[in-house]
Amino acid sequence: MKILITGICGFVGGVLAKSWLEASPGVEIYGLDNFIRPGSEYNRNHLQRMGIKLIHGDIRLASDFETLPSVDWVIDAAANPSVLAGVDGLISSRQLLEHNLLGTVNILEYCRRSDAGFILLSTSRVYSIAALADIPIEPANGAFRLKSGLPLPQGLSEKGIGESFSTAPPVSLYGGTKLASEVLALEYGEAFDLPIWINRCGVLAGGGQFGRADQGIFAYWINAWLRRRPLSYIGFGGEGCQVRDGLHPRDLMPLLLKQTASSSSVSDRVINLGGGLDNSMSLAQLSQWCHDRFGRHEVAARPENRRFDIPWVVMDATLAGQLWEWQPKTHLDSILEEIAQHAEKHPDWLELSGLP
């Protein structure tokens, strides 16, 4: 089998490439990356030593797909992952659309020509910000939790957010590009008889993830705490009660192996993937973990909410379990310790990741 992974020199793409070679030694992996992210060159050397065929290319440029070899499947791990992208002044709204939407179009056109299957790594940020903000929650032990005894909106259960939860705007420009990419991918699948899977992932985290908040809050927080960089609880009273669940990208591999080997008999093309309640944690709880691991560090409070901040996001992966017998394997404590050990071994990781 031949696999093309876009964005392969990012954290998720690199972990999937390594995990795929370990799971299927005979697989032939090609990687496409434009190497513009800080830290990409670091991953590039490791991937080349594993025998992966790396190709310098930009998914925004249709011409960069013209000379690519045909493959059986494309795993799309290339995107600008920041929910503030397009409005934060770092990149323009057009640049975001070119990265996250036009890039998907170019990949899908390549899949059409190559008769290749397509797996989109999407995001929990396709869900409605207004609906997420209206989830009935209360603080307890330094973390938000669902209020008991109250009716829950469609798509939400005690296990978390399901696939039928609202995706009504606003979802942010970033979330909008990913949601539009999902729709286009499914339409291409129907129009050209291509196998398509949409995997909506929660927060992906692990050792070697770039130490930036837009890359992943767990890695950023641990690296910044260890280096005694300034940290702040932003929004929701400045107490750090906002909750996310964590998932190691290597835990995606059993699912990806099944999806790339599957016929089109599974009707549900969109599934949620995340650590779930057992692998969830608030910022305040993460700070306590860091305090126990590294010692004391002050965290400032900025009580005012930002426009795209949401207090509680936990992915319910029940459907993935029913359809694919999938569940996360790596506990959040193990993920955090892996990040911590990597941070200790790489004292320049924040600078390598592009933080000033």
Image: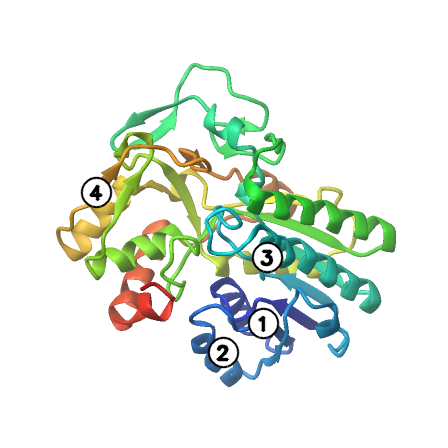
Mark 3 / mark 2, whichever is N-terminal: 2
Tell me, yes or no, whether the two marked residues, 2 and 1, touch with CB atoms within 8 Å. yes
Crowding at dot 2, Cα within 10 Å, few <14 / some 14-19 / many 20+, comes out as some
Label 4 SS:
strand
Nearer mark to the viewer, of 3 and 1 = 3
Label 2 SS:
helix
Residue at image coords 52%, 48%: 327
Crowding at dot 3, Cα within 10 Å, few <14 / some 14-19 / many 20+, comes out as some
Q: CA distance from mark 3 to mark 1?
A: 17 Å
Residue at image coords 46%, 75%: 43
Q: CA distance from mark 3 to mark 4?
A: 32 Å
Nearer mark to the viewer, of 4 and 2 = 4
Residue at image coords 16%, 47%: 298
The label on residue 33 is 1
The label on residue 110 is none
The label on residue 44 is 2
Mark 2 / mark 1, whichever is N-terminal: 1
The label on residue 300 is 4
In the rendered structure, the answer to whether residue 356 lies left or right of residue 119 reads left
Type of amino acid at the residue the image marks with label 3: Gln
Q: Read off the residue under disc 3.
A: 95
Label 3 SS:
helix
